[in-house]
Image (cartoon, rainbow, N blue to C red):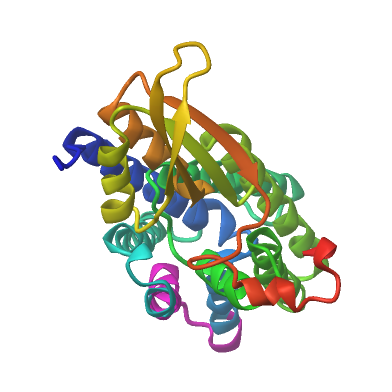
Amino acid sequence: MKKLKLNKQAFTDWIYIIFGTGLTGFGISVFMNPARLAPGGVSGLGTIIYHVIEDKTGKTLQLGLIILFLSIPVYLLGLAVFGKEYGVRTLMGTLLLSFFTYVFDTIFPGGILDYTKESSLWLCTLFTGLTNGIGMGLVMRTGSNTGGTDIIAQILARYTPLGIGNALLFVDGTIIFSSIFIFGIENALYAAVVSIIISLIIDRVIVPFGTNYAKTVYIISPKIEEIGDYILEHMNRSGTIIPSRGLFSGEDKEMLMTVIPKKDLAQLTRCVKSADPNAFLVIQDTYHVLGEGYQPIEVIADSKDVSQS
């Protein structure tokens, strides 16, 4: 089978990754860290560690380096658990976020606002949410991510009854709660607002395919085998080819059904468009996925109350 050529799209994806991580790094360095906000994620945990070191020793360590030291072990853990799913793009997203945070922290040491003013704290809450939401959303559009706690959340979702959304809420919520003991409850509440803004922007604006973790996609096209090859080779996913017949035309056709994480949906739709611009797609929200690559069946089967899963 002839492989799909997505060189132009690959170039666009790297632009998104670079710009997205750059914007996120800017928001972390200029708004989030100086205002002592820790809205979850590796960057939030890094912010806590940064200020603990500064308050205890009077010395500072570059936040970009702290994020890097925290991210690499998490990335390697994800690689060990999920294999190729965490490939070059995720690694580059992780490295670029650390790099841009380091650069902007160097250009704007101490930030650009008077962080003792309450109005500045609100501005930092708003603009941290905007920059991180837009930046992370652009990276997610490529099917990549910036690493960090989403990997931990996916591991928890695989080995516990928690869904991916609840697992991510648990991990980030733990970081936000921990920040109470370092920055106080007021800053922790501001950080919670930041987390909400980020989620809203990613789900409603940057990734306009809904808000659930996984999607079931039905594809009808003469290029089913070509699309299927791409899903297998480049997305590390599988699917099922279902014989079908057009109700109006009466023609025999093939339909491909696949279940993918939400973050991979943009990549799949670009693949289908490249193979067959006239393809017919049906995309559905999928609230729970059991089996290989997702949550083990026994986790739910052994649960006392399956309805709460």
> Visible in this render: residue 136?
no
Where does the image place residue 89, in percent across and percent down from the top left? 30, 57
Toward the left, the furthest residue is 2
Residue 301 percent location from the top left of the image: 73, 73
Residue shown at the point (17%, 37%) measured from the top left: 5
> Residue 72, image x and y in percent?
38, 76
Question: Which residue is nearer to you in this view: 79 or 56?
Answer: 79
Q: Quadrant of residue 8?
A: top left
Q: Quick one: which residue is furthest to the bottom in this view?
A: 57
Q: Reply yes or no: does residue 307 show up in magenta.
A: no
Can you see residue 90?
A: yes
Total numbered badges shown on the rendered structure: 0
What residue is at 44 percent from the left and 12 percent from the top? 249
Residue at 27% from the left image edge and 29% from the top image edge: 274
Q: Which residues are magenta?
A: 55-75
Q: Residue at x 75, y 72 (%)?
A: 177
* Placement of 223 over or under 188, stated as above or below: above
Q: Residue furthest top?
A: 248
Image quadrant where one finds the N terminus = top left
Against 30, is 225 above or below?
above
**Vertical placement of residue 109 versus 216, above or below:** below
Question: Residue 253 appears in which quarter of the rendering?
Answer: top left
Q: Is residue 21 left or right of residue 257?
A: left
Please identify the dominant SS of the magenta region. helix
Which is more toward the observer, 4 or 246? Answer: 246
Q: Position of residue 241 (x, y in %)?
A: 41, 43
For this view, does 74 lie left or right of residue 295? Answer: left
Q: In which quadrant will I find the C terminus?
A: bottom right
Q: Is residue 208 above or below residue 249?
A: below
